[in-house]
Amino acid sequence: MNLPAVLNGLLVSVVAALLWKYVRLIEHTSQLEEELALTRQSQEFSQVRIDYHGALLALQEHGTRMVCTGKMHTDRICRFDYLCYCTEAEEFVFFHSNTSVMLPNLGPRRFQPALLDLSSVEDHNTQYFNFLELPAAALKFMPKPVFVPDVTLILNRFNPDNLMHIFHDDLLPIYYTMQQYSDLDDEARLVFMEGWGEGAHFDLYRLLSSKQPLLKEQLKTFGKLMCFTKSYVGLSKMTTWYQYGFVQPQGPKANILISGNEIRQFASFLMERLNITREEGDDYIVVFKRTTNRLILNEAELLLALAQEFQMRTVTVSLEEQSFDSIIQIISGATMLVSMHGAQMITSMFLPRGAAVVELFPYAVNPEQYTPYKTLASLPGMDLQYVAWRNTMEKNTVTYPDRPWDQGGIVHLDKEEQERILASKEVPRHLCCRNPEWLFRIYQDTSVDIASFLDLLREALKKPNIKKAKVASTVHPGRVREPKCQTSVQATNEAKLSVSWQIPWNLKYLKVKEVKYEVWIQEQGENTYMPYILPHQNYTFSENIKPFTTYLVWVRCIFNKNLLGPFADVLICKT
């Protein structure tokens, strides 16, 4: 054997091994540098430290996990671990592995029409959320993910340029969605996926979390594949009270689940974040001033008339001329808020209890058809008085038919349609959002008829000391206790049914002005029942009570005419 050749072969092998180790070391170093860079990118979002290698391994081995609440897409909120978003495709991605979780596993029903609504506006086809699916093995061929270490709430803002939409559709639902989940705390981050820019009131969204909210466009600057380590997707709709007319003409929701108490708690939270305290002092009236459209043409005359009628100071506020927090500071101590119909009236939620909300409507606009602020003021626990004034004099209005269509112009319409709109005395009920007659009338300027305006206020505001109003009780009674029935037969065609019960347990701890009891009596096998409202805890019925018959009896308590308790268990009474 040639010794030099053997030594040369060994030397080559050693050098090759060293080179291979060096290349692997370089690759490992490069991988570590890449992971370090991605870790730094991830931590640009947050001070929360993240183990990048551990997060990547968890995503590769376990994939995405999803557990949702709610039965339908309209009431569903989903919690995800490692939900990812591809910024190039603008799609969310669910990565499958052997240990992935997807509850509910809807199959193709997930697309009928969507997994959930991203905003609080119900079943709007621009607000649907869904995701694409990939095997976790596909991660090998994709850009390395950037992880968002914060707990995130992913949602759509509905219209961040309009104050009514900001409060009703975004802020209130976000606030109470965060209340539902303990890890959506002040350290959680909001992620807005609708594609809008910040908008004029972005600072209001910043009040909900100590972390800067993220916009959809900003995600592109962080990487091609974003992965949220823990996220909630969707918003609670329990706080909304109004629907905007996408399917049927606008009006209050059929099933309102929020009261004024929850809205006032939210308003107090915002005031605290804005460092606003409600100051006690002299009574005064606030008039909202608009500067571009829907103007009050005789504003100075209106201010003077209010001051003289109520012997109070009058002040104006304007969104165009003042900061939002300074306006809330003023409104939070006002006795009355007067404004033309418009989004600025959502600030009435900051009024003190007992204050009055006076909404002005232009000519041909029926107040009964546009009631978001009337509905708000009328919620139990808001304790506000509401008055709507309508201009009924065509001579007191100024129209702008030559403006662009979205500012009420109608010159783009054919001559016959223009003439019909000009001759109309009331805008007919309509769907959202581009009805030309509605836009033409709502963008009118108005000269308020002072005489009819003051007459309306005198009639509607019966209590001059409205700021002293007491908080209305919204406590409901419990079940009546120990319900019993006794029967007796007087003759072959005459019988009596006696029903008695004890007061609800919580009544002995409450001061209630009026307590009554509702009794329903139904003959077994019949579809109708006889209802009675009674002031006492026992009563004997003889009218329509037949011998040798079985009756079903239900009893419940009523506080102050409208606060209903649950029915007690049904009584089965045989005569």
Image (cartoon, helix red, strand yellow):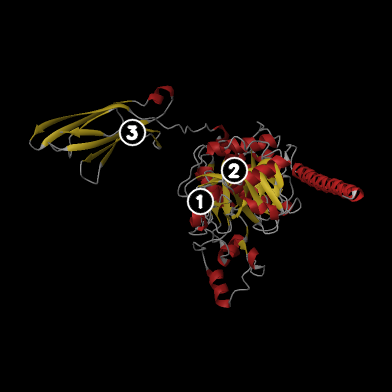
The numbered mark, 3 or 1, whose residue comes first in the sequence reads 1
Q: Which residue is mark 1?
A: 74
Amino acid, disc 1: Thr
Residue 485 in view here: yes
- The image position of residue 492, as x and y in percent, is 7, 36
Image coordinates for residue 125, horizontal then vertical, percent: 55, 59
Q: Secondary structure at mark 2?
A: helix
Q: Disc 3, disc 1: CB below 8 Å?
A: no
**On screen, 207 above or below 137?**
above
Query: Which one is earlier in the sequence, the residue at label 2 or at label 1?
Result: 1
Quadrant (top left, top right, bottom left, bottom right) of the C terminus: top left
Above or below — where is 267 with respect to 478? below
Q: Which residue is mark 3?
A: 556
Q: Which residue is mark 2?
A: 172
Residue 442 point in image, percent of width and height: 59, 60
Is there any visible trace of residue 382 in the rendered image? no
